[in-house]
Image (cartoon, grey):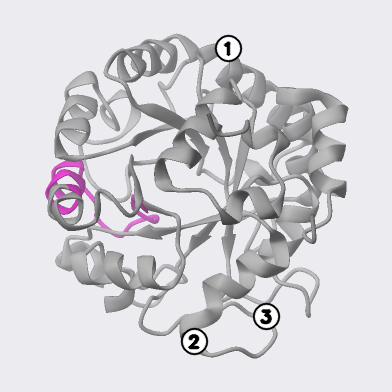
Amino acid sequence: MAKRMLDCTASDLARFTKEDYLRSIAGSEGRVLACECIGVTMPVLTDVTNAEFAASMGADLLLLNMFDVDKPVVNGLPQVAPEETVREIKRLTGRMVGINLEPVEDKMAADNDETLWRMSPGRKATVSNAAKACSMGVDMVLLTGNPGNGVSNRAITDSLRAISEKMKDKLILAAGKMHASGIVGEGGENIITREDIDEFIHAGADIILLPAPGTVPGITMEYVRELIAHAHSKGVLTITAIGTSQEGADTDTVRRIALMCKIAGTDIHHIGDTGYPGMALPENIMAYSIAIRGVRHTYHRMAVSVNR
């Protein structure tokens, strides 16, 4: 049986298979923290990647947003061959690494051409991009959407099915939305329903993503708890996500969200990437970690050497 992720060192994770990761997360009983990071922005610490900073504050899983598998850029990283970018992050942090891929509807994505979230071919949720990610050392692919990019649940299902047919045995596949992503009619409680969860699972999802309670209008703790229980009854894990900039709120707000997610029963807690541009406020990463697992496990994750 795989060790709980709470207790894992870098050398443990280096030996893990996909199934080991899933068992390790489940065994941690709602005490796994995922931090989303953007590599193409200026790092908060200038010459230290946002991924390293997030890991140092207690993140167990690093989720790279806006990561282009054709043109991988993580500012602050030592110079390496492009295809070694993810493996270098894993070497420096000793953490599990995932990336976002987006099943965008091209007409909607075009509206974002002048914004930070502008799409590129290497970020689309295609089988070839998922295969490239796997070859680069990515452990998990999350099919989701950035603000305004036009990602519907139907598009997620279609992309997930195609990727799962080729990559199911090699990659952890997660699916869901943190916000409406520009789709009229998929806001509030319509962001995800039981029917969406069933379709994602049937299409090959290992993990279902839902908005964290209190982050999207209408998404209550009771609603999320019901959906998490439904996902668990189908044999998959869940991740609750702060994707609405509240990773930059005061620490009391973040702690309250953390506890609601814990009460709702989630397996992985996600905190987003725009407290400062590129990552959550570092004090909020630590506050979230302490809220869901206390100082002992938080400080252990922060202190353990990547050379162990």
Name the residue tied to disc 2: 82
Label whose residue precedes the other's in the sequence (3 or 2): 3
Say few, some or many: other residues with alpha carbon within 10 Å of mark 2 (under 14 / 14 to 19 / 20 or more). Answer: some
Residue 22 in picture, x, y percent from top left = 45, 36
Name the residue tied to disc 1: 263
Looking at the image, which residue is at 53% across and 90% down?
Answer: 81
The CA distance from mark 3 to mark 1 is 37 Å
Residue 281 in picture, x, y percent from top left = 74, 50
Secondary structure found at label 1: helix
Looking at the image, which residue is at 68% across and 21% down?
Answer: 256
- In the depicted structure, whether residue 253 falls above or below residue 51: above
Residue 177 in picture, x, y percent from top left = 35, 41
- Amino acid found under the numbered disc labelled 3: Leu
Q: Mark 2 and 1 residues: CB-CB less than 8 Å, in contact?
A: no
Label whose residue precedes the other's in the sequence (3 or 1): 3
The CA distance from mark 2 to mark 1 is 41 Å
Name the residue tied to disc 3: 77
